[in-house]
Every structure is written in structure tokens, then in C-alpha cells.
């Protein structure tokens, strides 16, 4: 066995060689943490500075910034105080969110209101950390807890809230809130997946027009009623664009502190050419902002699922508009002294029709035309009678009030309280006639849907078809809230007022008849019980209480703190359609009594027939 050689012992390196590198690393780390603490120190708002508070809360200062605020109590008596939330600090250190990060003592009591900042802006103190966004974007809105798990999640939310972006719209409620209720809104109707140049164009428009709200709708699966007929016809892969400009009203139903805004009315300026580009859209938006003549639409657009039936209905509307335009062009081309031989619907045609009927009446009753002398004598007698009647109502010197006494309001001419705005009555009549055609078409579809359900041909829940009762309720609500149902009841035209009253009575009888039919037929067809579902109740509740009453808590959570407002029946908005129906004289209790009486009569008749 060989001899094992001894291992040579290794000598350790001298310690003085590592002292200098270790000292350099320690100094570098100390310098890093020192500089990090200096640069990333979050500033605190002085609660005693009223101007600074208004700048943070409402963005009223010259800076015009958006703020991300952390409610953090101020250290007292020289103590260190609580540490800053790591989530808020990490988001601040990231630096990519377009917001100024500040600290604020939310327990401070505001001298004007006597409330703390928590109570003034309804911030939930129990949700930690308590972070809210304010400034140029609007009053303080608390950030939900689900976005405060990491700094990256808070940064992502701040970018979504503060960076300009086009709103995605999928429901009618979103269309009204995010687009139609804005002063100016540009809506992109996508005909398919948007190309990169379309995305770049929208991004550039957001930067060029910061005060304009932009939104998009996927028109491959969604259909906008009351709007499609004004735009180029839908083609797959072709995008369309339209600009909305608010005329009056709003969607707020009002509460204890605010009044109802009235029915929302808007106008449109569509892009006539198919396809979109940055230049064409920019020119269209600029024209709308500079006051180019826009077209008022009689009814607000509604979003529905695109079907062949809706496309056919829209195609018929286009044909009617083309016919109207063609007839108008033909009338404009006729010479001024054109002789009309038949009543073609024009003013001169109606006049000739009246003259023809008058001549037939005179010939049938042997009435001779009056001579000029007889006409003059009749005119003289008429004027004399007018003077005698006027003398009875004239105020003499003895009837006049004494000097200094005010004149009663009934003797004063109130004038035109609505202002001197010019209204094209012919255009308004055309809009009303267009609405009537649409309502008749929609009513026929509702009746057809009812017949299919009653006959057992269709099961709307299994077949995926719309609920005919919900469609009927929505149609009747639309009629009551439109000019056809007398929504603009301030007009003094007695003929229009009578027509509106007749329409409201018809709506009342229609709804009563539908409910009565469902009640009588339910024992024979149990599937009719499914007609009264969530959609029907939602439509009825929104029509009475306003659209704000059906807002979902989850939708509000990402934007603002939940506010619980309790309002009684007397505090309902004046713009709800059933409030308008009540003002117009419709008695809903009377409708209920009529239904009960008719049901009793039908039961008695059925029992009588069974006895026989």
C-alpha cells in the first residue's frame, strides 16, 4: 500500500484586501437608500390651506391636475406616525400613472360644513388603505378595495380612470350615460375588428379633442334603432361614424337637492361616406364644435341585438325617406302656378280638394254662389257685430284702476315665455309621422309575438326570441315619452293636444287589454306565466322611478363610492313617463278597476255558458 501524501495547508488571503471593496459596497447602499428616501417622499397637503384643498378636491387651481390621495393621519407631538401604505408607495414609485400622489389627513373637520373629509365626500373609513381620486377628473371618488392589493393594480386603475380612452358601449343605458348625455360625443360603429390605423386615428383624436367623449359600438352584433336610417347602410368590415350634440335635458331624475333635467334630446351629424380615417373624423368633429347645422332626431337611439327583422325594418325606413325626398324634389321643381287636379297631400292639393267638395255640396243642396254685393254686406254686418261685442269688454275711464295700483296679471300680455326660437313645423310633422310609422310597425311585431306564444308556436325562453310582453311594455313607454304621446304638452295647438290625449287613452286600453288577455289565458296555457319576468319589471320600474334606480352596485364600484339615497313617491322625477301620464289625466287605479270589472264579467259569462 502506497504512502498517502499530506495535503498542503492553504493560507487564507489577507483581510485588508477585502476591507476596501466591502466599505465601498456599504457606502453605495447607504447612498442608494438615502437618495431613494429623498426622491420618493410623498408630499402632504396642508389642511389649513383652503386653496390647496379646493385644488385637490375639484381641480379649481391653475395647475389643473389629477390627484391620487391617501388618507393618512398627520403625526402629532413629534412622533413618527403611521407608515405610508406600501401599495400607495409602490404605485408612486412606478411613476407611470398620470396623477399627483399626495397625503391628506381625512379626519380634518372642514370649517364650512362642520364635517370631516370622510363624511363630506362619503368615504368609507373602514376600507384600508383609503385612497381616492380627485382634481380635474371631478370630485373625490374612492378606489375600491379590490384594486388596492398591489401597487401595480392601483397604477392600472389610475391609468384607466385618468388617461383618455374611448368608452365601450354594449347597452342602451351605457349609451345614454357615456355618450348621449355628454355635450359632444363621437360614436364609432365598428363593422368588424378595427384595423391598426383606426386605433391610431382614435388615439390621436383623443389627444386633439380632450373635451369630446369618444365611444365605440360593435355593430356586427348590435343594432341601433332610431339611428341606423340616418347613416350609410351597414356592410361587414366597413366602419361608420356619427357625432352627437346634446340639445337639452338629461338623464337625472332628480332628488331632494336637485331638480329633474327633463327628457334628453340630442342632434346628430353623421359621416356620409363609408369608411373612416383620421382626417374625415377630425373634420366632422370640428364642424360639430364650430356650430355646423345638425339634425335633431325625434327619438333617442336604442341598442338591440342585430337581427334580419330589424335590418328589414331599417331598410323600409330608408325607402320611406327616399320617397319623401323624391316627392319634395318633384314639388320644388314644379312651376309656381302649377295646377293640381288631385289631392296629392300638398298644401295646394288639399286646397283644391276642399274647393271641389264645396262645389259638390253647393250643387247637391242648390246653393247659389253669393254676389260681391252680398259678400260686402255680410262683411259690414260682421264688423258691426264685432264692434258691439268689443264695446262690452272695453275698459272705460271709470273702470280703470286708481293711480299707483298694480294691474292684475290677467290684463297683462305674458308674451312668449319659451323664447323666439324658430321651429320648422313641417319638419316636426314629418318626424312625428315617421315615429307613428315606426310605432305601428313595432306594434305589429309585438302582436305577432303574442300570437305565436299563445298558439304555442314559439317559446321565447327556449328559442332565444325576445319577450313579447317586455317588447310591448317598452313600446308603450316609448310612445308616452315621445311627442306622439304628448310629452311636449306645452303646445297650444288643440288638434295636437286632442291627438295626444287619444293616444294616451289608446295606450291605457292596450295595456289593460294585454294584462286581461294574459290573465284569462293563463289557466289554459301555463307558459304565459313566464311573460312577466325581470325584463318587464325592469322596464316598468325604470319608467316610473327613472333609470338611475336600476343601476348595479358593481358597475358603480369602479368609478365612485356607493351613495344610498332614499326618496319617497312624491320625490320622483318629473321626467318619468308615468308622471307625464298622470299629469295628462291618466288614472292608473281606474285602469286596474276596469281590468277587475272586465275579468268578473268574463267569469260570469263563462259560468253561465257552462250551466247551459
Image (cartoon, rainbow, N blue to C red):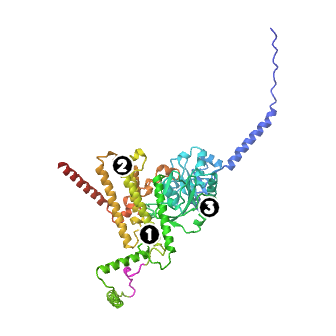
Quadrant in the picture for residue 566: bottom left
Give above or below for 448 relative to 17: below
Q: Nearer the viewer, residue 75 or 244?
A: 244
Q: Is residue 212 within the magenta segment?
A: no
Q: Position of residue 45 (x, y in %)?
A: 60, 56
Which numbered circle lies on residue 453? 2
Q: Nearer the viewer, residue 454 or 21?
A: 454
Res 458 visible? yes
The extreme left residue here reads 612
Q: Which residue is mark 3?
A: 280
- Describe the element under mark 1 as helix, strand or loop: helix
In space, the residues marked 2 and 3 are separated at their CA atoms by 48 Å
Give above or below for 398 relative to 112: below
Q: Which residue is mark 1?
A: 429
Give above or below for 584 relative to 336: above
Left or right? Give the position of 284 relative to 447. right
Quadrant in the picture for residue 462: top left
In space, the residues marked 2 and 1 are separated at their CA atoms by 36 Å
Q: Nearer the viewer, residue 447 or 159?
A: 447
- Dot 1 or dot 3: first in sequence order is 3
Q: Position of residue 591 (x, y in %)?
A: 30, 59
Q: Position of residue 419 (x, y in %)?
A: 47, 75
Res 540 visible? no
Q: Nearer the viewer, mark 2 or mark 3?
A: 2
> So how many labels did they put on this image?
3
- Dot 2 or dot 3: first in sequence order is 3
Stretch in magenta: 403-414
Q: Nearer the viewer, residue 217 or 315?
A: 315
Amino acid at each position: 500500500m502506497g504512502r498517502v501524501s499530506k495535503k498542503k495547508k492553504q493560507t487564507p488571503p489577507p483581510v485588508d484586501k477585502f476591507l476596501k471593496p466591502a466599505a465601498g459596497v456599504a457606502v453605495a447602499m447607504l447612498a442608494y437608500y438615502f437618495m431613494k428616501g429623498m426622491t420618493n417622499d410623498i408630499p402632504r397637503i396642508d389642511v389649513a390651506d383652503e386653496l390647496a384643498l379646493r385644488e385637490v378636491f375639484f381641480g379649481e387651481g391653475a395647475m389643473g391636475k389629477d390627484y391620487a390621495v391617501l388618507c393618512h393621519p398627520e403625526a402629532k407631538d413629534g412622533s413618527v406616525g403611521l407608515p405610508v401604505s406600501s401599495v400607495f408607495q409602490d404605485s408612486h414609485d412606478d411613476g407611470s400613472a398620470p396623477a399627483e400622489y399626495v397625503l391628506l389627513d381625512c379626519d380634518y373637520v372642514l370649517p364650512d360644513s362642520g364635517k370631516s373629509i370622510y363624511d363630506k365626500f362619503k368615504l368609507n373609513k373602514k376600507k384600508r388603505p383609503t385612497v381616492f381620486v380627485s382634481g380635474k377628473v371631478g370630485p373625490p371618488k374612492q378606489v375600491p378595495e379590490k384594486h388596492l392589493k398591489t401597487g401595480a393594480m392601483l397604477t392600472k386603475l389610475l391609468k384607466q380612470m385618468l388617461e383618455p380612452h374611448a368608452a365601450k358601449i354594449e347597452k342602451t343605458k351605457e349609451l345614454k350615460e357615456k355618450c348621449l348625455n355628454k355635450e359632444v360625443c363621437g360614436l364609432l360603429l365598428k363593422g368588424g375588428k378595427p384595423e391598426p390605423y383606426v386605433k391610431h386615428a382614435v388615439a390621436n383624436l383623443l389627444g386633439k379633442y380632450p373635451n369630446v367623449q369618444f365611444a365605440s359600438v360593435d355593430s356586427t352584433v348590435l343594432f341601433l334603432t332610431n339611428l341606423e336610417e340616418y347613416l350609410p347602410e351597414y356592410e361587414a368590415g366597413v366602419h361608420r361614424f356619427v357625432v352627437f350634440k346634446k340639445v337639452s335635458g338629461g338623464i337625472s331624475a332628480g332628488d331632494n337637492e336637485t331638480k329633474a333635467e327633463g327628457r334628453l334630446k340630442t342632434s346628430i351629424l353623421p359621416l356620409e361616406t363609408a369608411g373612416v380615417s383620421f382626417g374625415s373624423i377630425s373634420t366632422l368633429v370640428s364642424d360639430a364644435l364650430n356650430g355646423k347645422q345638425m339634425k335633431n332626431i325625434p327619438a333617442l337611439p336604442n341598442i338591440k341585438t342585430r337581427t334580419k327583422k330589424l335590418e328589414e325594418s331599417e331598410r323600409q325606413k330608408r325607402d320611406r325617406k327616399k320617397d319623401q325626398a323624391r316627392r319634395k324634389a318633384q314639388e320644388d321643381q314644379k312651376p309656381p302656378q302649377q295646377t293640381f287636379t288631385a289631392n296629392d297631400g300638398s298644401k295646394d292639393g288639399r286646397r283644391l280638394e276642399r274647393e271641389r267638395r264645396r262645389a259638390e255640396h253647393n250643387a247637391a243642396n242648390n246653393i247659389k254662389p253669393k254676389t260681391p254685393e252680398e259678400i260686402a254686406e255680410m262683411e259690414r254686418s260682421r264688423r258691426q257685430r264685432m264692434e258691439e261685442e268689443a264695446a262690452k269688454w272695453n275698459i272705460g275711464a271709470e273702470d280703470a284702476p286708481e293711480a299707483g295700483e298694480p294691474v292684475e296679471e290677467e290684463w297683462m300680455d305674458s308674451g312668449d315665455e319659451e323664447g323666439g326660437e324658430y321651429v320648422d313645423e313641417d319638419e316636426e310633422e314629418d318626424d312625428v309621422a315617421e315615429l307613428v310609422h315606426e310605432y305601428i310597425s313595432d306594434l305589429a311585431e309585438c302582436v305577432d309575438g303574442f300570437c305565436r306564444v299563445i298558439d304555442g308556436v314559439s317559446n321565447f325562453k327556449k328559442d332565444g326570441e325576445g319577450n313579447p310582453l317586455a317588447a310591448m311594455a317598452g313600446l308603450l313607454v316609448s310612445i308616452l315619452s315621445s311627442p306622439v304621446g304628448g310629452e311636449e304638452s306645452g303646445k297650444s295647438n288643440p288638434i295636437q293636444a286632442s291627438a295626444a290625449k287619444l293616444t294616451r287613452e289608446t295606450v291605457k286600453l292596450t295595456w289593460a287589454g294585454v294584462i286581461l288577455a294574459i290573465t284569462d289565458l293563463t289557466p289554459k296555457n301555463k307558459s304565459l306565466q313566464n311573460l312577466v319576468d325581470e325584463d318587464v319589471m325592469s322596464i316598468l320600474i325604470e319608467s316610473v322611478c327613472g333609470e338611475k334606480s336600476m343601476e348595479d352596485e358593481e358597475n358603480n364600484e369602479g368609478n365612485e363610492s356607493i351613495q344610498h339615497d332614499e326618496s319617497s313617491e312624491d320625490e320622483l322625477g318629473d321626467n318619468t313617463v308615468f308622471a307625464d301620464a298622470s299629469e295628462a289625466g291618466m288614472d292608473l287605479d281606474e285602469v286596474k278597476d276596469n281590468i277587475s270589472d272586465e275579468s268578473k264579467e268574463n267569469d260570469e259569462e263563462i259560468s253561465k255558458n257552462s250551466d247551459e
